[in-house]
Amino acid sequence: MPKRIPPVPVQPGHHFCYVCETPLPAGDFYQRRGKPSSPCKACAKKGPERRAAFLALIEEAREEVRSVFARRPLPEPIIPEYQPMDGFARWLERERKKQAGKRKPPTTPHEPLSGPTRPEETL
């Protein structure tokens, strides 16, 4: 990450806080790897308050989006409800009655097959 350049000159022994935008003595900063780290101690303590303000803005924007894309109630169906299998059941009953009225052809007994029917009989 490139090094940030403070907008004002900073004296030796001081460090620039990019949150409150002021140069402060190095003692006002927490140390990280032996160097002062931004933000300063005062701004670091106010961090949760700053985040809460940002989170409130984000939540407000989310609510606005949710309201725009809220689910609308489904329209009433144009076709009334019906029993889809009822028609099939009536048709099936008619077909069975037709089949019962027809005369079945007489069945003839089958002739036995000639030759072996199982592989072990061939040996």
Image (cartoon, rainbow, N blue to C red):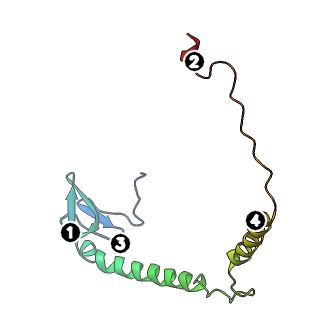
Place of residue 25 in the rendered image (x, y in percent of width and height, measured from the top left): 22, 67
Q: Is residue 56 left or right of residue 92?
A: left
Count every numbered label the image shows and give the total: 4
Please give the name of the residue rendered at 77% of the width and 67% of the height, measured from the top-left corner: 95
Looking at the picture, tell me which residue is in the foreground, 71 or 50.
Answer: 71
Dividing the picture into quarters, in which one does residue 4 lie? bottom left
Secondary structure beneath label 1 = helix
Q: Earlier in the sequence, mark 3 or mark 2?
A: 3
Task: Using the image, tell me which numbered label, if any, was put on residue 100.
Answer: 4
How many neighbours does mark 2 have within 10 angstroms: few (below 14), some (14-19), or many (20 or more)?
few
Callout 4 crowding tier (Cα within 10 Å): few <14, some 14–19, many ≥20: few
Q: Which mark is residue 28?
A: 1
Check disc 4 and report its element: helix, strand or loop: helix
Residue picked out by circle 3? 19
Disc with the residue nearer the chain's start (4 vs 1): 1
Quarter of the figure with residue 96: bottom right
Task: Tell me which label, 4 or 2, sits earlier in the chain.
Answer: 4
Label 4 vs 3, first from the N-terminus: 3
Side of 108 relative to 13 (left or right): right
- Compared with 91, 3 (above or below) is above
**Looking at the picture, how far across and down is residue 119, in whole percent?**
57, 18
Whether the residues at callouts 1 and 2 have beta carbons within 8 Å, the answer is: no
Q: Which image quadrant is residue 81 in?
A: bottom right
Establish if 121 lies above or below 60. Answer: above
| Front tag of 4 and 3 | 4
4 or 1: mark nearer the eye: 4
N-terminal-most mark, 1 or 3: 3
Q: Nearer the viewer, mark 1 or mark 3?
A: 3
- x then y, percent, for residue 18: 36, 68
- Amino acid type, residue under disc 2 in the picture: Pro
